[in-house]
Amino acid sequence: MTLEQSLKQRSDSSCELCGNKETLKVYEIPNSPEQVLLKEILICDICHTQVEDPEKTEPNHWRCLNDSMWSTVPAVQVMAWRMLNRLRSEGWPQDLLDMMYMEEEVKEWAKAGIQKGDAENSIIHKDSNGAIIEAGDTVVLTKDLNVKGSSLTAKRGTAVRRVSLVHDNAEQIEGKVEGQQIVILTKFVKKV
């Protein structure tokens, strides 16, 4: 049995990320450790294009990861984690990342691709004291902030839990204040 045939059998001839049954191809996960035996998944052209070219990524297409992130196949878990990580500034992917369970070695495999392949790691988010802020951290506001486009004023001392990072701007993070998703400047927060 060829690799493609075994992947089709494993995936019931559908994309292992979105479930599409058309234009399937074998995709080898980049930056895979040598000791991993099966580092390929079966994906459709739509997923392949968006995985390979971040500029063409359509966030709503990837809501399918809500299902595929629970796959028992480590290679599928790795790709789901990497795509959710790429999209975390959208808000909803951070919630899925927080729920996602992976064995430690699988998570290391997933992180290896991010460190080598994504430029977003070159952007470091720091709070008002210079402490590095990471996705999922809790921060406290250091001054009252008027939220643009809203009558909401985020009060000094408000804790913002599970922040997400704005991937292309080191001076901005996102979080929920009183149930509203807002962008916050890092110079007005302190990491807890």
Image: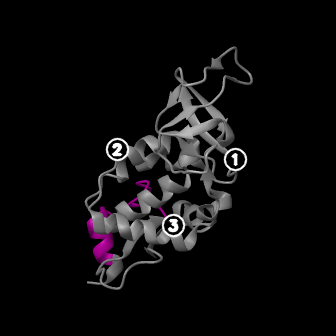
Q: Looking at this view, is 46 or 59 the one in front?
A: 59
Residue linked to disc 3: 114
Q: Residue at 74%, 22% (x, y): give it.
A: 149
Q: CA distance from mark 2 to mark 3?
A: 19 Å
Give the SS element for disc 2: helix
Report the magenta residues as a range.
Answer: 5-22
Q: Earlier in the sequence, mark 2 or mark 1?
A: 2
Task: Give the residue type that dot 2 points to.
Answer: Met
Mark 1 closeness class: few <14, some 14–19, many ≥20 residues within 10 Å: some
Mark 3: few, some, or many residues within 10 Å (few <14, many ≥20)?
many
**Relative horizontal placement of residue 106, taking residue 85 as reference (left or right):** left
What residue lies at 28% left-to-right and 64% top-to-bottom? 104
Tell me residue 125's x, y (percent): 61, 52
Residue in front for this viewpoint, 76 or 103 = 103
Residue carrying label 2: 99
Mark sitting on residue 26? none
Amino acid type of the residue tagged 1 in the rendering: Glu
31 vs 120: above or below? below
* Number of callouts: 3
